[in-house]
Amino acid sequence: MSNKFKNVSNSFSNIDTVQGHCEECKEFTVLVAIIPEFYRCTGCGADTKQHINGRIRYLKLDESEIKFIKENPTPKNGQAKF
Ligand SMILES: [Zn+2]
């Protein structure tokens, strides 16, 4: 029995991932949700914003949005109230 491995796979399955086209590296890649509507490219590591306008795009963030992410840790980071 490997409880350690089980925990790792469980926590990974809770992470929201999508496939999309990253504006930063121009690749079709897997993006991981860091907070709702904000995704991080697993290819280049860039943070992007989901933009739905007929089709889904993942856009680069501006300075204020990067700041917003830093100041708003996701509940998945263990910052949720119990
Ligand atoms: Zn990328």
Image (tube, grey):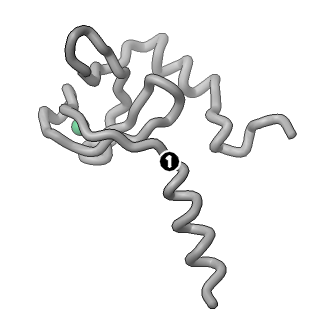
- Furthest residue toward right: 82
- For ligand 1, the image quadrant comes to top left
Residue drawn at point x = 26 percent, y = 43 percent: 44
Residue 37, quarter of picture: top left
Q: Nearer the viewer, residue 43 or 58?
A: 58
Residue 82 picture location, percent across and down: 87, 40
Residue 3 picture location, percent across and down: 65, 80
Residue 26, quarter of picture: top left
SS label for mark 1: loop
Residue drawn at point x = 63 percent, y = 25 percent: 72
Q: Amino acid at mark 1?
A: Ile
Residue drawn at point x = 21 percent, y = 43 percent: 29
Residue 18 picture location, percent across and down: 33, 39
Report the side of 63 relative to 6 (left or right).
left
Q: Nearer the viewer, residue 30 or 73?
A: 30
Q: Which residue is mark 1?
A: 15
- Furthest residue toward bottom: 1
- In what quadrant of the picture does the N terminus appear? bottom right
Residue 5, quarter of picture: bottom right
Report the side of 28 relative to 56 (left or right).
left
